Image (tube, rainbow, N blue to C red):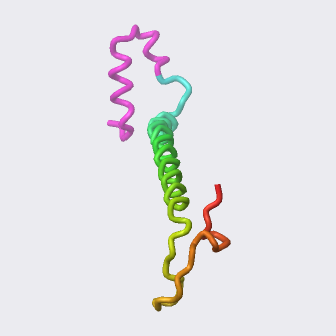
């Protein structure tokens, strides 16, 4: 009995093959390599979806920042309300540049 989940699948794929052909079904790659590839392929597809969704979120954040660039808000302090500021007038990481 083997611990690799791929071996039973290989045996099932070899069964309909001619004996001299079935032995070449898993020639070359390691079982670990096949399993790792099987794990990574869906991740690469998921990455495309994540990038698409993050791009959409970024566009929406940019749109909202532009729509509210002149909206007054409370200034950042240590839990005490301060004079209103306008975020677009600030420089640094808080400003949106595209």
What x and y, as percent, mark residue 39? 45, 40
Quarter of the picture containing the N terminus is: top left
Q: Is residue 15 magenta?
A: yes
| In this view, 39 is above or below 20 | below
Part of the protein shown in magenta = 1-25
| In this view, 65 is above or below 44 | below
Q: Nearer the viewer, residue 17 or 53?
A: 53
What x and y, as percent, mark residue 38? 45, 35
**Labels in figure, total:** 0
What x and y, as percent, mark residue 8? 33, 29
| In this view, 31 is above or below 25 | below
| In this view, 97 is above or below 94 | above
Question: Position of 77 compared to 97: left or right?
Answer: left
What x and y, as percent, mark residue 31? 47, 34
Q: Nearer the viewer, residue 87 or 70?
A: 70
Quarter of the picture containing the C terminus is: bottom right
Residue 16 location, quadrant: top left
**Residue drawn 36% across and 37% down?**
5
Q: Is residue 9 magenta?
A: yes
**Residue drawn 50% across and 40% down?**
48
**Residue drawn 62% across and 67% down?**
95
């Amino acid at each position: 009995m083997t611990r690799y989940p791929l071996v039973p699948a290989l045996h099932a794929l070899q069964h309909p093959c001619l004996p001299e052909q079935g032995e070449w079904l898993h020639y070359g790659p390691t079982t670990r390599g096949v399993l790792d590839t099987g794990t990574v392929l869906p991740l690469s597809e998921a990455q495309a979806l994540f990038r698409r969704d993050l791009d959409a979120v970024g566009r929406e954040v940019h749109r909202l920042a532009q729509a509210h660039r002149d909206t007054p808000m409370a200034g950042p302090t240590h839990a005490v309300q301060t004079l209103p500021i306008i975020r677009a007038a600030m420089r640094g990481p808080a400003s949106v540049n595209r």
